Image (cartoon, helix red, strand yellow):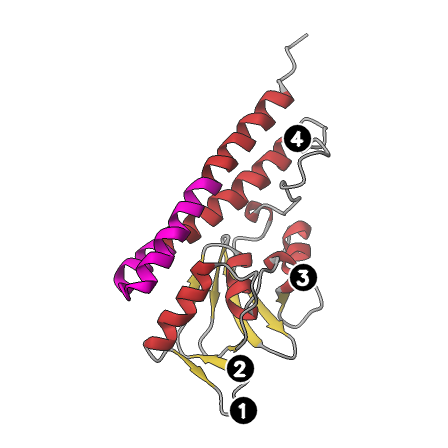
């Protein structure tokens, strides 16, 4: 009888990796805040891209841990709440998925493609930023406004995006749009339907 894999050991390795990624992200956010204070926007852009890349790796790490447990017919330990059961991008069709995110504060359109999300020019973003919004998205909004690529609408309660913006995860794009921490798989919906992006990816068909 073949030896059974050490589930606890593998999960522990995943959790250790995630902790290291969180530390990297925290250090990067500190550097972003420092660069923003000195108006070094070239450094801010580079650091923001790095932080978003870490976000994407963290999401993939969480997903891989869940998928690993599923393959072996076991669920992850219930005492690991920071491991969300998010659908893996590979479960979706290779074709891109048009998305929308609408509420009383924003009206955004985007394209999901292989895990990344491009928020399209012409989208309306929420003006107000809540405390839960991470610095990387505050800084990116500020930089776009400085360049004239994110402008305040006449009513003064929203912002208009004048360029396409790519994000490494649906949640990153969602936070950027709504101005607070949000789960992209839940708040983005497939254009023309009532299905969330997460439901679409879980279904595994176009």
What residue is drawn where x is 29% and y is 65%?
41
Q: Nearer the viewer, residue 81 or 201?
A: 81
- Mark 2 or 4 closer to N-term? 4
- Left or right of 52, for residue 64: right
- Mark 3 or 4 closer to N-term? 4
Q: Quadrant of residue 198?
A: bottom right
Q: Nearer the viewer, residue 170 or 135?
A: 135
In this rendering, does residue 116 appear at all? yes
Q: Bin the neighbour count of mark 4 within 10 Å (Cα to Cα): few under 14, some 14-19, many 20 and up.
A: some
What residue is drawn where x is 62% and y is 36%?
67
Residue 186, how many percent across, how many down? 66, 59
Query: Which numbered tag is attached to residue 12?
Result: none
Residue 201, how many percent across, how many down? 63, 53
Q: Kindly identify which residue carries mark 2.
A: 158
Q: Is residue 67 magenta?
A: no
> Marks 1 and 4: CB-CB under 8 Å?
no
Q: Bin the neighbour count of mark 3 within 10 Å (Cα to Cα): few under 14, some 14-19, many 20 and up.
A: many
Q: Kindly identify which residue carries mark 1.
A: 155
Q: Secondary structure at mark 4?
A: helix
Q: Quadrant of the N terminus?
A: top right
Q: Nearer the viewer, mark 2 or mark 4?
A: 2
Q: Is residue 27 above or below residue 105?
A: above
Magenta-tinted stretch: 22-48
Total number of numbered labels? 4
Q: Kindly identify which residue carries mark 4.
A: 69
């Amino acid at each position: 009888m073949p030896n059974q894999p050490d589930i606890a050991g593998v999960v522990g390795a995943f959790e250790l990796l995630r902790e290291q990624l969180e530390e990297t992200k925290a250090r990067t956010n500190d550097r972003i805040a420092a660069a923003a204070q000195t108006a070094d926007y070239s450094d801010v852009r580079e650091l923001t891209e790095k932080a978003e890349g870490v976000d994407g790796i963290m999401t993939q790490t969480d997903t891989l841990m869940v998928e690993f447990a599923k393959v072996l017919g076991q669920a992850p330990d219930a005492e690991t709440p920071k491991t969300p059961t998010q659908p893996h991008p590979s479960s979706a069709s290779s074709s891109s998925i048009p998305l929308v995110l609408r509420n009383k504060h924003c009206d955004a359109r985007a394209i999901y493609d292989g895990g990344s999300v491009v928020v399209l020019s012409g989208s309306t973003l929420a003006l107000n930023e809540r405390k839960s919004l991470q610095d990387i998205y505050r800084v990116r909004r500020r930089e776009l406004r400085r360049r004239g690529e994110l402008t305040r609408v006449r009513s003064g309660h929203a912002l208009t995006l004048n360029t396409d913006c790519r994000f490494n995860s649906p949640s990153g794009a969602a936070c950027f749009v709504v101005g607070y921490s949000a789960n992209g798989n839940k708040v983005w919906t497939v254009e023309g339907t009532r299905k969330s992006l997460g439901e679409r990816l879980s279904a595994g068909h176009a």
